[in-house]
DNA sequence: GTTAGTTAGTAAAGGTTACTAACGAACTTC
DNA sequence: GAAGTTCGTTAGTAACCTTTACTAACTAAC
């Protein structure tokens, strides 16, 4: 098996991230090679690429429904029992899959050996840099269950110093992980390109910061950096059970969103997809915005305004929140129609969003689109709360390294 | 080679369409098996699936840049010269690729044998059912050059009768094709699902008409049926050189669009993506629409209104057209921002759209989004004119059967 | 004119992958 | 206890792409 491993490892493409999982962890029984070097779209397929794809399918099936046997997997994935056995034996050798024992059912035939992903045997580190006063981070297992938390205050930090804060936070979390780390996911504000370079994040004073590369090299771990709202959308997709055509709208100091089409995140022609905060809403003016225009979505929805309104009397509070919701509905209606979205999810301060605002958005969306044409549209709050970005970061790592989501 | 061929042909998945290309044409030297039975996403990869993928890559490279040698292909695609030679020899046997002769250059080394797709050796049939008074059809070669045209009047035809008109048109075109037909593409109005069933097309009185299946069985040819605006977007992508993140807006009796994200057409959660005609625009009312709402995009932009305005005096004409354009811009702005589109293309009556309307849309889009954030946005008319839908249908066939676009 | 170096394309051999066929193991049902 | 069923493995095969090595055909330079 040693030669086989060496060959498999040496072959293949350059990967976005530098190192493989487990390299920095003594506890790792074997490297995880599940998707190390994913098949790039549009590239040729060699036998080992096919193998990787099939490995991902098996992991995905195991991840979704635990307690499957090899024979179950064969039926589910469409490969033969022989091939599945071969793939599973690889996984078991890497400690990525474990045998749970015999299936307890009373059925004819030899009892099946149930398998599961070794969900607690590996860790993932997720970071959320979107809050202006604090960077938050977590360590989770493969299920996304949070096992460690950490924060570092960053108020007014910018540039190199902010990068240093990321390292401080990661140093802490990585040292506290008790299982081999599969990878690091980081949700950053601003425009982030496909290589995980933060093209522009004004609040952090970052311009063309190759954060993904910096982190990957420092920790020798596969790293994914992406926009915070996009990561939140990923998190909602996997852990919030959102549909394959959905939009996640984050409302906080600003307004951002992540758009998922056909199960895939949309990046856009210059990696700025989801940046809807400075779209002008309606044809009747509005407050002046920091960007120079008037009536931007952010002027209606940014949390300072909503919080101020919330402190007013009950009637004014409700009116302001409902109007904000209506404005959101007005600007989302064309997007919902054009993409035929099945679901729109809001994330942000629950006390501000969950009441009249959500209702206003919902009613406006319905009254401004053709519901009968586009089928049912679900509008709801996320159930993931504050952890939505870090969980999204975890999903990005799971997807990138194991092909699982 | 015979056993090999037989095996390759017998294996494989069920295909959306029933028959392979060339089955009904005596002139076909061999079946085209380029992509017959495309790899479904999420399904396991067997060796032959990988082969199909690589075949598509080679064809794609040849399609885009003609005059490539086997060695060029090897460099381009990333496979070895040996493998490329093997793939190319298959293509040549199928008559899908031809040798052009030696490269004329004066370079060191053995002169290369240039290859090209046999662009004139096969035909594709494309139909456009979106006009309310006439079904249009064409026969093209693999380049999309139109070699035959046909029409059939369908004013007030609905239901079975309209299906009959499709058959009449196809009978004519199929009989006039002088080369083996690779497949049939049909752009239909209304909601069309992934199987090519017209879920709903009110103008034609169609509900759940399995048009793709009907045509595929009748002509024993691979068939693709999709929404007309979506097909137009495909046509603009391939033959109009549009970018990978774009939107094509068709303005005629109604307003429809096709959205392309990351190079892929968006279908939406209930196959109604692009249906933006009945989105309410602005917050200042508008004319009543047949759908019951007021101020729908169609009330501002549908061609009867524009034509009426065009007959008025010059000042009123320009004002109406510009206002219509502005309304389009208002409703597109959120979509452009959310998806970070690089390009928006208009298709429809040139005399109505190309002037003040386009300008109004362009200015409105710029003034209501953050151009500096989203990079340059191109807004333009299509150069494909009336043929945009039939050409899109041709692209769908090319993509579906040869993996080329 | 000869030699060296380069490029194109082919041939043979080898490794990986997943398949089919067949079998033993372990259980239920009659 | 015999028969049937299901699980997982073993053995052998087909398909695919690779590496290595070769010939053919050209340019460049001495």
Image: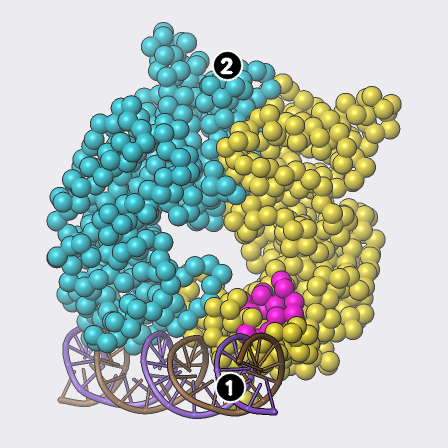
Chain colours: A cyan, B yellow, C purple, D brown
Res B362 label: none
Distance in Å between CA atoms under marks 1 and 2: 71 Å
- SS at mark 1? helix
Q: Chain of mark 1?
A: B
x 50%, y 26%: residue: A278
Q: Residue at x 15, y 52 (%)?
A: A179
User: From the viewer's perspective, is A299 left or right of B256?
Assistant: left
Tell me where residue A382 sits by quadrant. top left
- Residue topped by disc 2: A287
Q: Are marks 1 and 2 on the same chain?
A: no
The verdict on residue A65 being magenta is: no
What crowding class fits label 2: few (fewer than 14 Cα within 10 Å), some (14-19), or many (20 or more)? Answer: few
Q: Is residue B53 magenta?
A: yes
Which residue bears the numbered disc 1? B4
Q: Quadrant of residue A90?
A: bottom left
What stretch of residues is rendered in magenta?
Answer: B52-71
The subunit letter for the residue under badge 2 reads: A
Q: Residue A25: horizontal and vertical position, in percent?
A: 15, 54
Q: Is residue B77 above or below residue B84?
A: above
Q: Is residue C7 left or right of B385 when viewed as pictured? A: left
Callouts 1 and 2 close, C-beta under 8 Å: no
Asked if one can make out residue B181 in the rendered structure from this viewpoint, the answer is no
Q: Is residue B216 above or below residue B353?
A: below
The residue closer to the viewer here, D27 or B92, is D27
Q: Position of residue B136 (x, y in %)?
A: 78, 55
Q: The C terminus of chain B appears in which quarter of the rendering?
A: bottom right
Count the numbered circles shown: 2
Residue A167: image location, x then y, percent: 23, 39
Q: Where the N terminus of chain B falls, by quadrant?
A: bottom right
């Amino acid at each position: 098996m040693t030669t086989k491993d060496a060959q498999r490892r040496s072959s293949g493409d350059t990967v976005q991230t530098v190192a493989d999982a487990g390299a920095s962890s003594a506890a790792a029984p074997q490297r995880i090679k599940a998707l190390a070097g994913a098949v790039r779209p549009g590239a040729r397929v060699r036998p080992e690429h096919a193998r990787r794809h099939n490995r991902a399918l098996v992991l995905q099936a195991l991840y979704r429904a635990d307690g499957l046997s090899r024979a179950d997997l064969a039926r589910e994935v469409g490969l033969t029992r022989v091939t599945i056995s071969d793939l599973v034996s690889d996984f078991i050798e890497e400690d990525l899959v474990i045998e749970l024992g015999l299936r307890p059912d009373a059925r004819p035939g030899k009892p099946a050996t149930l398998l599961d992903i070794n969900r607690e045997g590996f860790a993932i580190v997720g970071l959320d840099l979107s809050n202006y006063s604090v960077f938050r981070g977590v360590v989770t297992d493969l299920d996304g269950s949070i096992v460690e938390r950490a924060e570092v205050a960053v108020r007014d930090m910018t540039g190199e110093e902010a990068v240093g804060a990321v390292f401080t936070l990661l140093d802490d979390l990585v040292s506290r992980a008790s299982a081999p780390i599969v990878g690091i996911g980081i949700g950053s504000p601003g425009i982030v390109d496909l290589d995980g370079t933060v093209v522009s994040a004004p609040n952090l004073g970052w311009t063309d910061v190759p954060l993904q590369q910096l982190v990957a090299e420092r920790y020798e771990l596969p790293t994914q950096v992406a926009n915070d709202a996009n990561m939140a959308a990923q998190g909602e997709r996997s852990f919030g059970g959102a549909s394959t055509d959905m939009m996640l709208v984050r409302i906080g100091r600003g307004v951002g969103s992540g758009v998922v089409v056909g199960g895939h995140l949309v990046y856009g022609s210059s990696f700025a997809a989801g940046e809807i905060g400075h779209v002008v809403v309606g044809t009747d003016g509005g407050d002046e915005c920091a960007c120079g225009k008037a009536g931007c979505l952010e002027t209606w929805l940014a949390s300072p305004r909503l919080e101020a309104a919330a402190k007013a009397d009950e009637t004014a509070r409700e009116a302001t929140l409902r109007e904000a919701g209506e404005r959101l509905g007005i600007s989302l209606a064309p997007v919902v129609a054009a993409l035929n979205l099945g679901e729109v999810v809001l994330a942000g301060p629950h006390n501000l969003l969950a009441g009249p605002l959500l209702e206003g958005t919902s009613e406006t969306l319905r009254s401004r689109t053709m519901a009968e044409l586009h089928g049912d549209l679900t509008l709801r709050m996320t159930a993931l709360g504050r952890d939505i970005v870090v969980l999204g970061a975890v999903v990005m790592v799971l997807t990138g390294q194991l092909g699982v989501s």
